[in-house]
Image (cartoon, grey):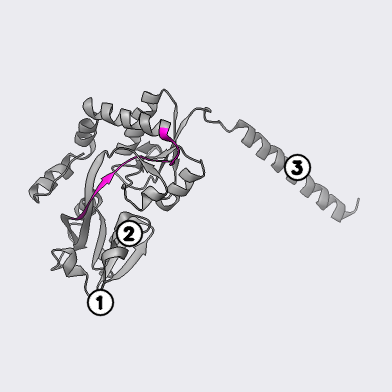
Amino acid sequence: MNPISILSSRWLRRIFAAVVALSVTVACKPKSPANALVVGMDLSYPPFETIDPAGRPTGVSVEIAEALAKSLGRPLRIENIPFTGLIPSLQTGKIDCIISSMTDTPERRGSVAFSEPYVGTGLALLVGKDSSATSIADLDQSGKTLAVRQGTTGEIWARANIKNAQILALEKESAAVLEVIQGKANAFLYDQMSIWKNAQEQPEKTRALLAPVRKEQWAVALRLDDSALLEKINAFLREFRAAGGFDKLGEKYLGDQKAAFREQGVEFYF
């Protein structure tokens, strides 16, 4: 047999084996139940939505999603999606709702429906340890840089209200924090609880200004036409709060934050 023919035969056998293996893999991949509640989250935001050392979703939002699915009598599937991709995934039907520390805003209400709020928070500032800034007014100055996370209300608010400072939009929270640590940005504008957490993790290089630049509320996002699920989610949130569900989650995940907010005289409610 021609050596080229032998080589070709070997490649054909390998390709055939690979196709068979791929077919078996696809066929054996477990499928979610047809009635699963599919919740979108960006699992990069502890303690609300993150991944534990074993690779499982965990955090406040995860436990809310689990309780919601149980109340609906449906199995739960969590889809880990970058924050900027959550609303498009909802609109295209990839997920049923978003529980991912998402702020209810007039701008977003043009694209999605929101449940009743379940968290009250606000935008705050992470600044360098030796920064003299005490407010956003100190930072909205020519020659200064304000870091924000792409797609968040911090970016939306900054682009509408910051007139003099440069706005630096970054995909990852960790990248924005690093800009402040390295002195490349004068501050990072993000939600209060994340700002507090990052200041705790970098106490030698940063500090938190927790007084809210703007107050916000987080809610569950749904498709605009999904009124039936919206009604069920609102009923669940009321029942969960009345049963002490949010209080228990607050004590489990947010006890230190509550104490720190009290020290600065800043309102905290969950």
Residue drawn at 17 percent across, 67 percent down:
137
- Report the Cα–Cα distance between label 2 and label 1: 21 Å
- The residue nearer to you, when weighing 259 against 220, is 220
Q: Residues within 10 Å of mark 1 (few under 14, many from 20)?
A: few
Determine whether the residue tagged by mark 1 lies in a helix, strand or loop: loop
Looking at the rendering, the stretch of residues picked out in magenta corresponds to 213-227
Q: Which mark is residue 156?
A: 2
| Residue type, mark 3 in image | Phe
Q: Quadrant of residue 242?
A: top left
Q: Position of residue 254 (x, y in %)?
A: 20, 40
Q: Are marks 2 and 1 in contact (CB under 8 Å)?
A: no
Please identify the quadrant where the C terminus is shown.
top left
- Report the Cα–Cα distance between label 1 and label 3: 62 Å
Q: Residues within 10 Å of mark 3 (few under 14, many from 20)?
A: few
| Residue type, mark 2 in image | Ile
Q: Is residue 144 left or right of residue 80?
A: left
Q: Closer to the N terminus: mark 3 or mark 2?
A: 3
Q: Which mark is residue 192?
A: none
- Residue 242 seen in this snapshot: yes
Residue on which disc 1 sits: 143
Q: Is residue 240 left or right of residue 1?
A: left
Residue 249 vertical placement versus 11 (above, below): above
Direction bottom: furthest residue: 143
Q: Which mark is residue 16?
A: 3
Q: Is residue 26 left or right of residue 60?
A: right
Determine whether the residue tagged by mark 2 lies in a helix, strand or loop: helix
Direction top: furthest residue: 73
Q: Closer to the N terminus: mark 2 or mark 1?
A: 1
Direction right: furthest residue: 1
Determine whether the residue tagged by mark 3 lies in a helix, strand or loop: helix
Q: Quadrant of residue 133?
A: bottom left
| Residue type, mark 1 in image | Gly
